[in-house]
Amino acid sequence: MDRAADLLTRFSRIVAADGYDRGLQPVQWQALLFLRSANRFSRTPKALTAWLGQTKGSVSQTLAALEKKGLVARRADPDDQRVVRLGLTEAGAELVAGPPRAFAAQMLDHLTAVQRNSFAALVEQMLRAELVRSGGRPFGLCRDCRHFERDACGQGLHRCRLLDVALSEADSALVCIEQEAA
């Protein structure tokens, strides 16, 4: 491997280890972070499986462990009983509440705003290329989607043309499995 690949691997392992100090496996921590940032349409086992890039079985085990710890709850969708919706419990929400973990902030603290933006752009470019290669879903924020209509339902009330639903300002800042870049 070349130096950049070695550094990326090391960086990934450090980031993935976040959450161990809270008694969680890396994948469990990532699942909680996803559920914190996902919109109501994306809080499903299927979307979580796509986000994590794991098998259904692995994600099912992850969810079972998180339920046992009292951090995640499953419920049937009120509009379609076949669909399972996931949510953070109060304990789960408290665990992932607040600003990003100190170690992540410390890793980026010494970078200037220009360097941070460059870093983010490079990581996004690598991620998109890998998702294209592997057939993965890109996800993304509602407000950056081609289906998003700002203020379509009044001031601060937006609309998703794909799902034909109203979105609040808070909804527009969440991650969606259906997102297609504008």
Image (cartoon, helix red, strand yellow):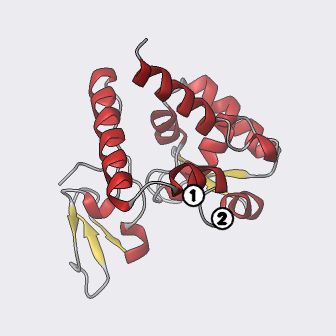
- Residue 70 vs residue 164: left or right? right
Q: Position of residue 72 (x, y in %)?
A: 70, 51
- Residue 174 vs residue 30: left or right? left
Q: Position of residue 173 (x, y in %)?
A: 39, 66
Closer to the eye: label 2 or 1: 2
Front residue (pair 138, 16) = 16
Q: Which label's residue is closer to the chain start, 2 or 1? A: 1
Residue 39, picture quadrant: bottom left
Front residue (pair 59, 27) = 27
State whether residue 182 is above or below residue 67. below
Crowd rating for badge 1 (residues with CA inside 10 Å; few <14, some 14–19, many 20+): some
State whether residue 14 is above or below residue 140. above
- In this view, which residue lies farthest toward the bottom? 155
Q: Position of residue 162 (x, y in %)?
A: 24, 56
Contact (Cβ within 8 Å) of mark 2 with mark 1: yes
Residue at x-position 34% and y-position 22%: 134
For residue 97, the mark is 2
Amino acid on which disc 1 is placed = Arg
State whether residue 64 is above or below residue 83. above
Residue 102, picture quadrant: bottom right
- Residue 61 vs residue 146: left or right? right
Residue at x-position 22% and y-position 50%: 181
Determine if residue 145 is in view.
yes
Quarter of the rendering occupied by the N terminus? top left
Q: Can you identify the residue that label 1 sits on?
A: 36
Residue at x-position 64% and y-position 31%: 60
Q: Position of residue 116 (x, y in %)?
A: 38, 53
SS for callout 1 = helix
Question: How many angstroms separate mark 2 from mark 1 (CA)?
Answer: 8 Å
Amino acid on which disc 2 is placed = Ala
Crowd rating for badge 2 (residues with CA inside 10 Å; few <14, some 14–19, many 20+): few
